[in-house]
Image (tube, rainbow, N blue to C red):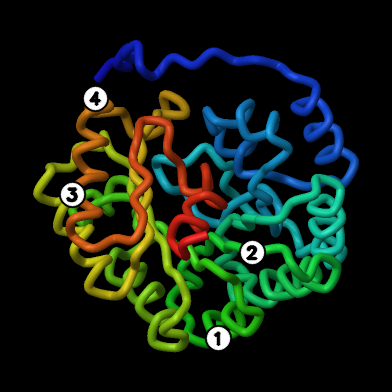
Amino acid sequence: MGKMPKPPWLKKRISLGPNIQKVSALLKETQLHTVCQEAHCPNLPECFSRRTATFMIMGNICSRNCHFCAVTHGNPAPLDEEEPQRVAFAAEQLGLEYVVITSVTRDDLPDGGAKHFAKTVHTIKEQRPKTVVELLIPDFLGNPSSLETILSTPPAVLNHNVETIPRLYPRVRPQADYRRSLDVLQGVRSRNASMLTKSGLMLGLGERESEVIRVMQDLLDIGCRLLTLGQYLQPSKQHHPVIRYLHPEEFEGYKALGESMGFLEVSSGPFVRSSFGAAQMYRNAIGI
C-alpha cells in the first residue's frame, strides 16, 4: 500500500522562535531526551516555543519494537544515575509548573525502570515542591511491585496508553497486551482511588468506530477519566501504514461522545498527543 497524501488539515506552519533554540540548547547541554524529538512529534515547535517539553528518561533506545513508534529500538544502555538530577535542573531552568515524564520501555531491567522513575519524580519535587508531575509509563510487564514503586512518589496523573483497539495489537503492538495495559490502569486505581488516570489512542490504524467506543467503555469501567485521541502519522515506510485520515469533525464527535459517556476530560483532534496540553487538561479535570 502506497503512502497516503496528507489532507490539508494535517499541514502545520512551522515557526522557529527564539525559545525553540533555547529549549533545544538546554536539552543538548543537559544531555536529555524528549519524546517530542525522538517520536517526531508534529507539535514540537509549538511546545518548545512555550518552553515546555516531555522528558523521556532511561535513554533513547527502546527494548520493544512497536510498529507505530519512531523511537529507536535495540539494546538500551545502562541507566544514567545522574539523569534525575538533570531532569530537575532542566525543569528549573524552564520554570515548569507542570512536568510530564515518560520513558522508553526497559524490559531489560528487573523493575522496568520503576525506581528510576520514582527517583526522578522525588528529585523534581525536592527542588520544586509546587511542581505538578504527570507520568506516562510503560506496562512494566505487569509487575505489581513496579507499580507500587511508581505510586510511592506519587504523581498527580498516571498515564498509560492503550494506543489502539485489541484487534490491532498483533500488528501494531506485538510485544504488548491489551488486557495487561488495562490492568496497569486498574492497578493504579485499586491502590489509590483518588489518583487521576489517563490513557490514549491513535486513530487511523484500521480500527472501527464501534471498537473505539468499546475501548472507551473499557477505560471508564476501570476508573480512567482522562482520554486523548489523535491521528496516527506514519513515521517511515517501515512502520504501520495510515489506513485512514479522520476529519476534524470526527474527532469532535469522539470528544462529545467521550464526555457524554463520563470522561472528565477528552482531548481529541488530529494533532492531539498524550502530553500535548497536559497541564490544561489536568487543571480542567480538577476544576482550577
Q: What element carries label 2?
A: strand
Label 2 to label 3: alpha-carbon separation = 28 Å
Q: Position of residue 106 (x, y in %)?
A: 59, 64
Label located before the other in sequence (1 or 3)? 1
Q: Say which residue label 3 marks.
A: 257
Between circles 1 and 3, the one closer to the viewer is 3
Q: Identify which residue, 31 or 64, lies in the foreground.
A: 31
Spatial CA distance of label 1 from label 2 is 17 Å
CB under 8 Å between discs 3 and 4? no
> Which residue does the numbered mark 4 point to in the structure image?
247
Direction left: furthest residue: 210
Query: Which mark's residue is nearer the viewer, 3 or 4?
Result: 3
Circle 3: residue type: Leu
In the depicted view, which residue is nearer to us: 175 or 186? Answer: 186
Q: Are marks 1 and 4 in contact (CB under 8 Å)?
A: no
Report the Cα–Cα distance between label 1 and label 3.
33 Å
Q: What residue type is labelled 4?
A: His
On screen, 148 above or below 65? below
Give the residue at mark 1: 148
Q: Which of marks 2 and 3 is nearer the N terminus?
A: 2
Is 246 above or below relative to 104?
above
**Which badge, 1 or 4, comes first in the chain's sequence?**
1
